[in-house]
Image (cartoon, coloured by chain):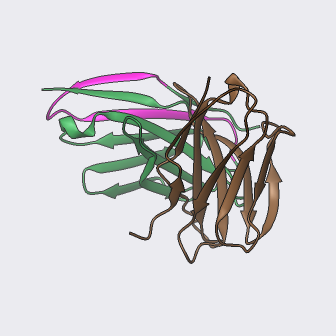
Chain colours: A brown, B green
Amino acid sequence: DTGVSQNPRHKITKRGQNVTFRCDPISEHNRLYWYRQTLGQGPEFLTYFQNEAQLEKSRLLSDRFSAERPKGSFSTLEIQRTEQGDSAMYLCASSLTTAGNTIYFGEGSWLTVV
Amino acid sequence: GEDVEQSLFLSVREGDSSVINCTYTDSSSTYLYWYKQEPGAGLQLLTYIFSNMDMKQDQRLTVLLNKKDKHLSLRIADTQTGDSAIYFCALNTNAGKSTFGDGTTLTVKP
């Protein structure tokens, strides 16, 4: 399967701990996105990369959040000093930088902060 | 910023047509998408339409776009129980990110 891959799929952590999620995009896609989704809401944009450059960050991405895509392939999203409000599904997506720009999503990583 | 509105719930009987509606505020959106999400899963792209089109048909799915009224709809013909899910409307500009509505939960009754 050559879709967008995310891991871990589920993570339960204690408040104050750090967590890291990994995303492997579709191999030829140069754009990679992170979204957050809470129950009853649509996905909210966090940030996106074009190759290794982080082009846009949402106001939702506080100082405790950092995303990297060091070689323009996979990406990591780290949350430091987790809070209960960080509990959500973190979705990764990827696309080509061409007309149409169709974005394909992974299955998501569920985070529960207890 | 962009505001995308969807009705929260829709219930239909198996075999009927479903129509899910979406309204938006930003007329500069270039691409408009419909995604399907089943419980605990990620988003599956169903179909999309370019802003210079009025209609797109793809098997049981028909997308209608009324740019004047900033209204997008998804019609599912011959709705099946497997179509029960949450449907998201999303808008995208060339800037890259997409803005999503809060989803419409479709329930199909046998």
**Residue A22 percent coordinates (x, y):** 61, 56
Q: Is residue B12 rendered magenta in the image?
A: yes
Q: Is residue A6 rendered magenta in the image?
A: no
Left or right, residue B28 beside residue A59:
left
Left or right, residue A79 beside residue B92:
right
Left or right, residue A96 beside residue B106:
right
**Residue B65 percent coordinates (x, y):** 49, 46
- Residue A1 figure quarter: bottom left
Residue B69 seen in render: no
Q: Is residue B90 above or below residue A113?
A: below
- Residue B4 figure quarter: top right
Of A38 and B92, the residue lying toward us: A38
Of B16 and A14, the residue lying toward us: A14
Residue A9 seen in render: yes
**Residue B109 percent coordinates (x, y):** 18, 24
- Residue B5 figure quarter: top right
Of A51 and A86, the residue lying toward us: A86
Furthest-right residue in this view: A63
Range of residues picked out in magenta: B7-27
- Point out the image quarter for the C terminus of chain A: top right
Q: Is residue B109 above or below residue B82?
A: above
Left or right, residue A14 beside residue B7:
right
Q: Residue at x 70, y 41 (%)?
A: B26
Furthest-bottom residue in this view: A28
Q: Residue at x 67, y 35 (%)?
A: B25
Q: Residue at x 57, y 47 (%)?
A: A91
